[in-house]
Each structure stands twice: as structure tokens, then as C-alpha cells.
Amino acid sequence: MNFQFSEDDLEQVALEWFEELGYTVKKGREISETGITPERESDKDVVLDNRLERALRRINPDLHNNAIQQAIHEISIEKSPNSIENNRIFHEMITNGIEVEHYNEDGETINDLVYIFDFNNPENNDFLAVNQLIVVNGDDNKRPDVVLFINGLPVVVIELKSSTNESVGVEDGYHQLETYKMKIPQLFNHNAVLVTSDGINTKAGSMTADYDRFMTWRTKDGKTEASSTMASLDVLIHGMLNKEVLLDLIRHFTLFQDDGKGNIVKILAAYHQYYAVNKAVDRAIEATSDQGDGKGGVIWHTQGSGKSLTMVFFSGKLIQKLNNPTLVVVTDRNDLDNQLHSTFVKSKGRSGKGLLRQTPKQADSRKELKELLSVESGGIVFTTMQKFEPEEGKVTMDALTERRNVIVMADEAHRTQYGFSASYDEKGEGIKYGYAKYLRDALPNASFVGFTGTPVSSTDKNTQMVFGNYIDVYDMTQAVEDGSTVKIYYESRIIPLNLPTDLDIDAAYDDITSGQEDDVKTRLKSKWSRIEALSGSEQRVH
């Protein structure tokens, strides 16, 4: 189907979709200081104070007025001249609550925690969609097409472009959002998602994402991908910006990393990561229950599609859902262990209040591994497969912990070293088993979740015995379509090795090697005349 939208038509239909989802819809001029239902004292203001106060009282009904007022103050003031730093601080307030200190009528000091959003009950929050909201900053006056508010805070900014105008498109919408960030930065202190769309093509991303990191949301329900006959903005609004999913994305699928150069990078999960993690968390909770079988399943997300971050998001949400779990991240090489550990460490947040809320630990020895696994308060432990091996002369490994709330996350779970099979060691050390057996010996009551970038063979019984069946699949075709993975083209052709007729190589060679012994001349001539050397020369390969 060939969709054609003018910008005004697209804006109106978007507002209708938000109304379907239960959002209140208002025009920007209606809530301005001179509007029929004013909610702003001036066009500089981006926080709707009355909505915010009503929401805080509703979500925190037992708190004193002083605590509510202090929380509003903390939310409204800028803590840094850097917009992304303000955004990070605010996100910590959302996820952890705001710590306030105030005095009661008797003059006693009271410490309270004020929550901004009700993540457990989406309908207890206030959702508002506003079009053409004028925002002023100094001499700059900008008007984003649609802004979404939760509890009076602007969390989504949407820029729309006409699909009938071939000279502008989705990327122009992205650049318009970049302009807004520079000209009216106060609008982005509380931002969660940026969206650009012409109706046909729609992409969403975080406020630090480059255009190539903006992504399409391809499903409304997480079960089936939308067909090409469905407008992409419709899919994103109903699939990503419905109340439940938007709150979940803000709470569990947003993280901040340091890039190593002093800059903050904000990362928002893609749709395939979001749905895979939620399915994996549900399966892990079931696997760790008293009736569970310990098989958490396998996530196959093709290489280049963000598997490491999927593991981070999974860890972050699982930590909050289970009671102090211990997560054991297992790889089969030290370099992979270091890489994955680095990704997790960067995701813990500057203040330790980020998605993971703790510092992941690496076990450098079996002794340290046992010590880390014995910690009842849980944690995230990184180790290699080779540390799960019995002491010399034993065919079984002693249990390191018998707790049930231990989740093993195995990277590249399909590899052969995760097997159960036994073999006789020709060096005379007796029977040796695959590491899967030793893992089970060491962690007899643990549950296992596998992550892989390549498909598990249908004949691979070991992987199924340890982890169970697929939880989620995101294959190469989907990744290429989404731009997560790029195509590689191979062109088979023969390039002749003919030399110019006027080039006398033998004479030139004799001249260059005139001072060498005959056997050296012969050896060098043999080496450099091989077909591999000729085929790979710099003059021939471009």
C-alpha cells in the first residue's frame, strides 16, 4: 500500500492514536499562559506543575506536603549545565525515587522516598499528548510537533515530516530534533524517547543517539511483526508508546554508559531486545521456582544485533524481579570475559544507581569464584568455563552453592564445550566430561539461560539439555532489514596476472641481488614468485 501523508494529516492521526491509547490530548495553545486551560506560567516552562503535584500526591498518598514540595523542587531545577547529565540524574530519580529530608510539625527530621511514576499500575499515572507546544529559550522560539507528558513531565518529543514532499524525510526530522536540543535544551532534561516520522518510515532513539542508531519499532504486540501495508507510525505509537511499554522502557530498558572520553551515552533498547528480555525474565522466574526445571531457554540474536546489551538489560530487570539473585556470566575465553565484563561495568551508572545498581565482579580463580557465589545478598559474577573443572583425580566437581536463585548466563551457549559427553583422557587422567556436567555439579540448583549469535543445530542435544528451547529468535534477515547488521557482498572474478611486455623482471632482480650468494638469490626468487605473493600484492589488491 502506498501511504501518502501531509504533515498536518499525520499530526492529527497521531493524536487520534494517542487518544485510543488513553492519553488526554490537548493543543499547545490551550495549555499556554493565555490558553483556555492554562497549565504553564510562561512558554519557557516545560514542566506542568499542577499535573506533577497531583500525580505525586496520588502515587505517594502517605507523604507529608513538605516532602511533595521538596520533590517537585528537585525535579524542576537543573543540576548541571549539561543537558544529558541532567537527563541522567533525572532518570535515577525516576528509577530509584527522590530522597527528601524535611521536618514534621514537631520539628523532627523525617527522611522519605518520593516516587515520580507508578510503574506497577500504569493507569495511576497521567498521560498527556500535546501538539504544537511553543517552547522559548532566550531569543529562540521552537514548536515541536507532538510532546508526550507523563505526570506533567515531557518524556517524548515527536517530529513529523510530510511523505508527499520528496525533498524532506525522516532524517530531516532527526536533524530538527538535534536543533531543538541545542536551542531549547530545557525540553530534554526529562526526555526518554525521541521520534522522527513521515508516516511511512518511523524511527526512535535516545537523545545521544546518532541517526544510524535510531531504530524502527516493528511490532504492536511483540508476537508478530507488522506487515508492510501498515503505517510505521501506527506501529510505533501502539507498540512502543502505549502506556505499559513506554513505562517499562523507561524503567528497565534505558541505560547510561561512559564512552571512556568523559561523555555520557544514553542507550535505549531496540524492539527485539525489549521483547526477548521480557520473555527471558518470565522464563527465568519460572525456571528458578520450586517447580522449575532450571532451563531458562536460549536467545538467538544474530551477531551485530546488540547481544551484549541484551544480556545487560536482562540482568537489570531480573535483579529487580528476583530476591537478591546471583547472576553468573560464563564465557569460554578470557578476552570475551573481559569484553563482556567491561560492557556491564560501563552500564552500572556513575553513582551506582543505574540499571544494574552494583559493580560486577570477575572471578580470577576457582577459590574467588566460590567466595563470590557464597554471598547470600547476590551479585553479578563473571567467570570462564574452564574454572568449572574438578580437582585433579576427581570426575565430579564439588558444589559451590546450592541456592536456587542463581542464574547462569552463558555466552555462545551452543559451543561444544558446554556438552555432557564423557571421554577417556589418553594422558592417563581417567574419564573427563564436558563442562556442562561440571557446571551442573558446581551449581546443582541453578537455572541456565543461553545467549548465542548463531543458530543452534537441530541435532545439538547438549544445548537443549542444559538451557531448553529457544526463547526468542532475531535472525540475519531481520537484522539486515533493521540495519543492525550490514550485508557483505562477494563477487567472484579472475584478475589476470599478466605483466607489461616491456618489463624485464629477471634483469632487474639480478641487479638488485648482485651482492647476494647464489643460494640466497634462489631462495628469495622462489619465495616472491609464489602465486600467493603475486595475488596479494598491494599493486593488485584495491
Image (cartoon, rainbow, N blue to C red):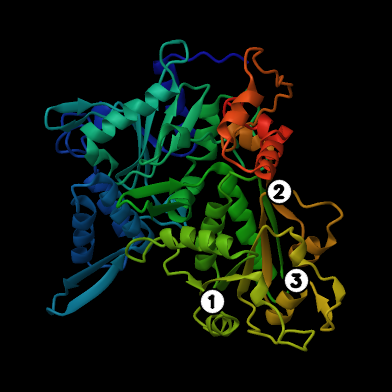
Q: For residue 411, which quarter of the picture? A: bottom right
Residue 384, percent across and down? Answer: 62, 70
What's the distance in space between the residues labelled 1 and 2, CA to CA? Answer: 28 Å
Label 3 secondary element: helix
Residue 343, percent across and down? Answer: 48, 58
In the picture of the structure, the residue carrying the numbered disc 3 is: 436
Q: Please tell me the numbered disc located at residue 454.
A: 2
> Where the C terminus falls, by quadrant?
top right
Foreground pick, 527 / 223? 527
In the picture of the structure, the residue carrying the numbered disc 1 is: 364
Q: Are marks 3 and 1 in contact (CB under 8 Å)?
A: no
Residue 224 visible? The answer is no
User: As shown in the figure, which amino acid type bears the numbered disc 1?
Assistant: Asp
Residue 284, above or below 428: above
Foreground pick, 271 / 64? 271
**Is residue 472 toward the left or the right of residue 54 in the image?**
right
User: As shown in the figure, which amino acid type bears the numbered disc 3?
Assistant: Ala
> Where the N terminus falls, by quadrant?
top right
User: As shown in the figure, which amino acid type bears the numbered disc 2?
Assistant: Thr
What's the distance in space between the residues labelled 3 and 1, CA to CA? Answer: 20 Å
Mark with earlier residue (3, 1): 1
Residue at the (39%, 54%) spot, across then down: 257
Residue 161, percent across and down? Answer: 41, 19
